[in-house]
């Protein structure tokens, strides 16, 4: 019995050593010309905006907060190209468009605005809205080998732009043309992270922005012909916008 256990242990140890040796012989280093795509899941927020009601007596706005500490989930795709040994260019972003159709007002049975029990209520109009958002981020990163064959450290920088716009209109006398709300933002950030190659084609990454600067602007125009009302904001973030990435190299 002891001999069998000993023989089994020797075989398993030998297999493990052989697998380790084979793994060490394989080179997982990203090479010039390699390309990769990944799905990025993180936290943070881009610009937000809303078209204002057109019949208010006064308007006040504040530039959107684009803090990358926000707990709102973000999801985008990334393409990466090794244009040189140890250096990669990357591009990531996303696009969203939504449309809310208009519905006309339906008057009820109240008389001269007086609503009594049993009357049918008025259904006010539903505003037509078009909502569009997109973001584009470009950057470059350098890969550094670690003492682990499948693990690589990388660092670099990126520049991002995000834009959002909402247009609202309705078949109502208060809407003299479209009501518009728009916002855009710029960001410059440093990036650090680790890539772990499960195989030569499949990898998992984690990354964070040690330092980031962002600038955002919010504009509204309640009616056509009115001057834009604008507000802007500057911000600096530290250790923000963490991301988990799942990707394929080819």
Image: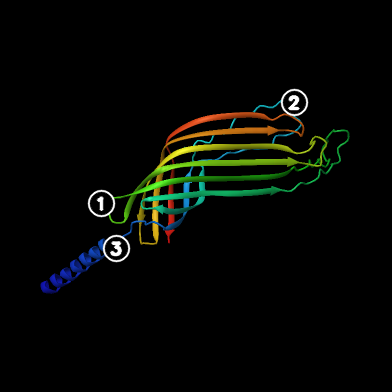
Around disc 2, counting alpha carbons within 10 Å, would you say few (fewer than 14), some (14 to 19), or many (20 or more)?
few
Q: In the image, what residue occupies the spot 16% across and 68% down?
A: 9
* Residue labelled with disc 3: 26
Question: Residue 68: x and y, percent?
Answer: 48, 38
Q: In the image, what residue occupies the spot 70% across and 37% down?
A: 180
Residue 68 visible (yes or no):
no
Residue 227 visible (yes or no):
yes
Which label belongs to residue 147?
A: 1
Which mark is first along the chain, 2 or 1?
2
Above or below for 3 versus 44: below
* Residue labelled with disc 2: 57
Mark-to-mark CA distance, 3 and 1: 14 Å
Mark-to-mark CA distance, 3 and 2: 70 Å
Mark-to-mark CA distance, 1 and 2: 66 Å
Judged from the image, the secondary structure of the residue bearing numbered disc 2 is loop
Q: Are the residues flagged by discs 3 and 2 in contact, CB closer than 8 Å?
A: no
Which label belongs to residue 191?
A: none
Q: Are the residues flagged by discs 3 and 1 in contact, CB closer than 8 Å?
A: no
Question: Residue 145: x and y, percent?
Answer: 30, 51
Relative placement, left or right, of 104 versus 66 is right
Depth check, front residue: 6 or 95: 95
């Amino acid at each position: 019995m002891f001999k069998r256990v000993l023989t089994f242990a020797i075989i398993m140890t030998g297999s493990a050593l052989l697998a380790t040796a084979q793994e060490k012989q394989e080179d997982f280093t990203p090479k010039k010309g390699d390309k990769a795509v990944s799905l990025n899941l993180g936290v943070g927020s881009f610009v937000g905006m809303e078209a204002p009601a057109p019949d208010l007596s006064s308007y006040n706005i504040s530039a959107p907060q684009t803090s990358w500490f926000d707990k709102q989930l973000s999801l985008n795709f990334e393409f990466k190209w090794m244009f040189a040994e140890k250096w990669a260019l990357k591009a990531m972003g996303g696009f969203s468009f939504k449309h809310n159709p208009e519905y006309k007002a339906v008057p009820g049975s109240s008389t001269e605005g007086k609503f009594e029990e049993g009357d049918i209520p008025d259904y006010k109009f539903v505003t037509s809205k078009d909502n569009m958002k997109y973001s584009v981020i470009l950057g470059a990163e350098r890969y550094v080998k670690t003492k682990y064959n499948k693990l690589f450290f990388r660092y670099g920088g990126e520049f991002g732009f995000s834009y959002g716009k909402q247009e609202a209109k309705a078949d109502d006398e208060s809407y003299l043309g479209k009501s518009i709300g728009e916002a855009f933002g710029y960001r410059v950030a440093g990036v650090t992270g680790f890539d772990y190659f499960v195989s030569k084609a499949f990898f998992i990454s984690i990354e964070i922005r040690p330092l980031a600067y962002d600038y955002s602007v919010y504009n509204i125009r309640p009616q056509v012909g009115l001057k834009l009302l604008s507000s802007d904001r500057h911000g600096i973030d530290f250790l923000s916008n963490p991301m988990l990435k799942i990707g394929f190299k080819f």
